[in-house]
Amino acid sequence: MTVKRSNISASNSESDDFDRPFTDDEFERGLGAALARRARTATGLSQSAFADRYGVPATTLRDWEQGRRTPDSASQSYLRVIAQMPDAVADALHHAA
């Protein structure tokens, strides 16, 4: 009986943890992940192709999309511009090189 109660209480504490509000850091990582995914989805490219086309390391992009890291403010702005004008950004980068 004691074992079952400890399992039940563990189960309850896990559900309590699930229902808790996000910390500021967790919330920011989630927004960064959504922004990175939205920009890449707008291009229709794979992570690798997006990274090559826009000069973002593939590992960084993957970390952003998975919420392990948060893009800094300049990167967030870059991702927003890519999401709105993917071809114009790619053309500008191509002509600048």
Image (cartoon, rainbow, N blue to C red):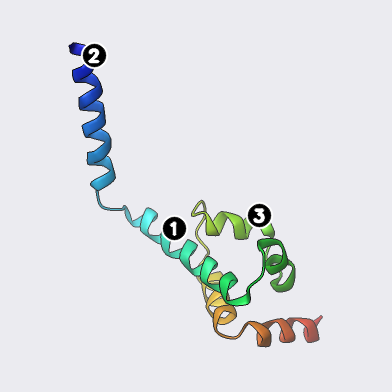
**Looking at the picture, how far across and down is residue 5, in whole percent?**
18, 19
Residue 36 to residue 80: above or below = above
Q: Are marks 2 and 3 in contact (CB under 8 Å)?
A: no
Neighbours of disc 2 within 10 Å: few (<14), some (14-19), many (20+): few
Q: The N terminus lies in which quarter of the figure?
A: top left
> Which residue is drawn at the image coordinates 67% and 85% (left, top)?
87
Q: Secondary structure at mark 3?
A: helix
Residue 29's tag is 1
Instruction: Give the spatial CA distance, label 2 vs label 3.
Output: 43 Å
Q: Amino acid at mark 1?
A: Arg
Which of disc 3 and disc 2 is earlier in sequence?
2
Q: Quadrant of residue 46?
A: bottom right
Residue 59's tag is 3
Q: Which residue is mark 2?
A: 3
**Looking at the picture, how far across and down is residue 42, in whole percent?**
57, 76
- Horizontal side of 91 relative to 2 (left or right) equals right
Residue 50 to residue 69: above or below = below
- Horizontal side of 16 relative to 71 (left or right) equals left
Q: Amino acid at mark 2?
A: Val
